[in-house]
Structure formats: C-alpha cells, structure tokens
Amino acid sequence: MPDTPLAPGLYLVATPIGNLEDITLRALRILRSADRIACEDTRQTQKLLNHFEIRTPTVSYHMHNEGPRADELLAELKQGARIAVVSDAGTPGIADPGGQIAAAAIAAGIAVFPVPGANAAISALIASGLPGEGFTFHGFLPSKAGQRRTALEELARDGRTHIFYEAPHRIADTLADMEVVFGAAQHVVVARELTKLHEEFLRGTVGELRAELAGRAVIRGEMVLLFAPAVQAEGASPPGSSIAAEVARLIQAENLAEKDALKRVARERGIGKSEAYRELQREQNRLR
C-alpha cells in the first residue's frame, strides 16, 4: 500500500534495462521512500530518478568502492536506515554490485528485501526459443582468448542452456571460439539491445551468426549470448574414421589448429583429450 511506511533494511531494487516502462510501482515507491539510494553510477541513476521526479539522495556504490562503501552503508543500516541499492540497469547482484552489501547485511541480522523487475539474462532466455527448465547464467566470458576458449570447452558435456553477457567488441571473437569448440552447426542466440528501440534477436548456427555480424560495418549494443551444447553421451561408440583422419579433415575444412581439431574430435567421441592425443600418436606412428 502506498501509505505504508517503509520498513528499515536493505532493498535490492531492479531497474529498467532499456524501456523505462519496465519499472514497477513498488520500485518507484521504495526509491521515493528510501533514506538513500546506492547507485552503480549516480549520473546514470539520476536520469531515471529525474524522469519519475524522485528526489532521494544518492551515493555511489560500484566495483571500485564496493568494500569501503558497503561498510559505510552497513553502519547506517544498523542505525535503522532504509537503503535502496540499484545498478545501472537490471537487477543488483547479477553481474553487477549488490551481493557484497547484501551478504554483510544478512550477517548483521538486517532485513534484505528483493524488489524484482527487469533482468537481461531472463528476458533473453524466455524469448530465445531455448530450453528454460534447466539453465546456467555465467556472467561475462573471460576477455582473453585462451581463457575464453577453455571456459567454453568446459561446457561441452553440459547440455543445459548457457547464458552469457557479452560486449559488442568481443562478440565476433567469442563466436569464432564457439565455432572451434562446438562446430559451425552449433545453434546459438544473440539478444541485442533488449527492451530498447533497436531490440534484436539473432538465432541460427554459429556460422550463420558470424557471417551476419561480419557483414555489419559496426556492431553496437549490450548483448546476451545463449546456447545449449549438443552433448554426446559418455561411452558413445566412436565414428568409423580414425582420429587422425578426423583431425586432418577439420584442419583442412575449418582451418583449425591441430590442438583445437583434436579437442573437437575428443568431445564428439566422448573421450578425454589425453586419450585422444595418445590414440592420435599411435595412429600417426603406424603410418610412418
């Protein structure tokens, strides 16, 4: 009820990820009634507050000051303050600041209230066409190519839907790594600029999406990347061709390095990389 006083405690308030109409009535009431609003970027949040004529004082709370600012906010909460936490967009604590102050408040016996609303990962998932019964949200992939490829390889045997946030300047490299790990036929979804004017869903194979994005002069907008690996059961019978022949085919057909081709063959045959490497060496020795 609008006239009910706001109880003391920490409020984790979801804010729009693009379309301002996605703010909830409850979120607006809490932002108006709080003693302070802790913001990932006060300038960004101020635009939202100005739009809805909210004049609650703000304070910065971001990844670079999360520790000391959390201590400061916790001291206020212990005195009975009502503090709202918001990120630049979406839900605090999901790939954004918020988790540290929430954990500290809980440890101190202070009430923590989730105020649900917009979230890019869930919004992308429900419109992706991919299975939503079991999924994993990973945040951002590593920015370094080797670490990113290793992270993707670890998902090769997990057929659940996987959700990542990705930056526009890295999406082409990430899709290239996905093609190496999963093959050009792996189905993938890229959700771009969710809830904004130029919202777009790209659905297709890795090869198709790479070609689509390569044809664009500029790639802009925040992105969500989703896919569900096609998993071969453990112990599945290997294909009729030899490992050496399969590795050679991938090197020629997809211009893969031998190491990447061998990883692909091992995954497809349901064996470990070390076992595949030993078999490759045996086959190559027999041919000498």
Image (cartoon, helix red, strand yellow):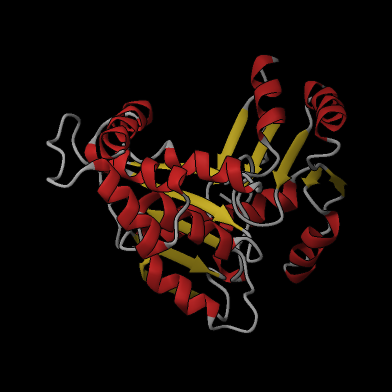
| Left or right side of 253 for 59 | right
Q: What's the residue at 59%, 40% (across, down)?
A: 147
Q: Whole-percent x and y of residue 154?
A: 43, 36
The answer to whether residue 54 is visible is no
Considering only vertical position in the picture, is 126 above or below 207?
A: above
Q: Residue furthest top?
A: 108
Q: Is residue 268 left or right of residue 87?
A: left
Q: Residue at left 57%, top 70%?
A: 193
Q: Position of residue 136 (x, y in %)?
A: 41, 41
Quarter occupied by the C terminus: top left
Which of the pair 207/121 is nearer the observer? 207
| Residue 237 placement: quadrant | top left
Can residue 116 be seen here? The reply is: yes
Say above or below: 13 vs 273. Answer: below
- Picture quadrant of residue 203: bottom left
Residue that appears at 85% across and 45% down: 60
Q: Find residue 84 and report its image quarter.
A: top right
Above or below, comparing residue 120 to residue 78 in the picture = below
- Please name whichever residue, 191 or 115, is drawn nearer the observer in this view of the structure: 191
Q: Position of residue 19 (x, y in %)?
A: 59, 71
Which residue: 59% across, 35% down?
113
- The spot of residue 100 in percent (x, y) is 70, 29
**In the displayed structure, would residue 184 be above or below residue 140?**
below
